[in-house]
């Protein structure tokens, strides 16, 4: 809010004249909550997609799915053992917490300020952070986001969200979906095929039991095209996390 007070560009963007006072930060917070409660963002996305489909700018057969961790604003200091009696902190603003020797997991602990956020890590050797899982469905023609879902970061959220979004694809009798190795699971591939969706998923040959994607799928030229197109979704996540400030919500 302080930057709006001295930046002409920001004043123009939000529709304020140079001599108009900038609103208080609490006003912005209340309006943000109204937008979330009214589901304006989802309606806006749906209208953009509708217009793109009318002009034939989107594919109705070939898609890509992917997910990413979005860090919660809740602090790790808010993580406490479930059912534990909470004693008043020594410093409410920055309480002292000693986690040494204590093993924390989502089964035994939860955040007292954001119970929906779960401990998750981006990969082996990375630190666990309170996060949620953001997921996108991208059409492969022009790389337009056509659907989005936010799930709890429970380990299977990416595949679960992908199936939910694939079920909502209108019209086409047969579609393909590109994805990375995280989606190479037999239950995901089987459910896709039940929905008449061909899983163009990157093989994970190190997975226990082998890959769910066999040579019959990989031999088609469409599989190779899907694997090239799916990289576009990384551009969407990059924009969302840097420009749209969704790295942490």
Image (tube, rainbow, N blue to C red):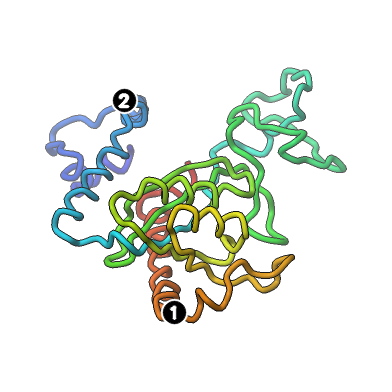
Q: Residues within 10 Å of mark 2 (few under 14, many from 20)?
A: few
Q: Nearer the viewer, residue 47 or 126?
A: 47
**Which element carries disc 2, helix, strand or loop?**
helix
Residue at 44 percent across and 75 percent down: it is: 223
Q: Is residue 30 visible?
A: yes
Image coords of residue 84 (percent x, y):
78, 22
- Please tell me the numbered disc located at residue 220: 1
- Residue 54, relative to residue 203: is it above or below? above
Up the image or down, 203 lies above or below 246; here it is: below
Left/right placement of residue 72 relative to residue 124 reads: left
Quarter of the image holding residue 61? Answer: bottom left
Query: At 57% from the left edge and 55% from the top edge, which residue is drawn?
Result: 188
Of tags 2 and 1, the one toward the viewer is: 1
| For marks 2 and 1 on the same chain, the one whose residue lies earlier in the sequence | 2
Residue 193 in the image: state x and y as whole percent: 49, 58
Q: Position of residue 220 (x, y in %)?
A: 44, 79
- Kindly identify the residue that appears in the image at 84 percent across and 42 percent down: 100
Regarding residue 247, the answer to whether it shows in the image is no
Q: Nearer the viewer, residue 192 or 75?
A: 192
Query: Residue at label 2?
Result: 27
**Quarter placement of the N terminus:** top left
Residue 232 lies left or right of residue 150; in this view the side is left
Q: Give the class, few, some or many, for how many residues have Cα within 10 Å of label 1's Cα (few <14, many ≥20).
A: few
């Amino acid at each position: 809010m302080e930057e709006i007070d001295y930046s002409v560009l920001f004043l123009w963007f939000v529709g304020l004249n140079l001599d108009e006072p900038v609103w208080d930060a609490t006003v912005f917070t209340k309006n943000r909550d109204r937008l979330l409660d009214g589901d304006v963002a989802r309606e806006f996305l749906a209208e953009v997609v509708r217009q793109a489909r009318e002009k034939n700018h989107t594919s109705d057969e070939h898609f890509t799915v992917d997910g990413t961790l979005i860090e919660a604003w809740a602090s790790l200091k808010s993580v406490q053992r479930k059912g534990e009696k909470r004693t008043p902190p020594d410093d409410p603003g920055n309480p002292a917490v000693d986690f040494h020797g204590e093993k924390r997991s989502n089964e035994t602990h939860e955040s007292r300020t954001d119970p929906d956020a779960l401990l998750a890590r981006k990969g082996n050797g990375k630190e666990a952070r309170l996060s949620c899982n953001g997921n996108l469905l991208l059409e492969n023609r022009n790389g337009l986001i056509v659907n989005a879902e936010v799930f709890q970061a429970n380990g299977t959220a990416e595949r679960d969200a992908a199936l939910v979004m694939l079920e909502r694809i209108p019209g086409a009798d047969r579609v393909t979906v590109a994805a990375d190795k995280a989606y190479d699971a037999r239950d995901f591939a089987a459910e896709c095929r039940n929905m008449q969706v061909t899983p163009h998923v990157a093989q994970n040959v190190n997975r226990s039991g082998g890959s769910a994607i066999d040579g019959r799928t990989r031999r088609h030229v469409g599989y190779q095209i899907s694997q090239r197109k799916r990289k576009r979704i990384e551009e969407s996540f990059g924009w969302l996390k840097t420009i749209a400030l969704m790295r942490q919500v």
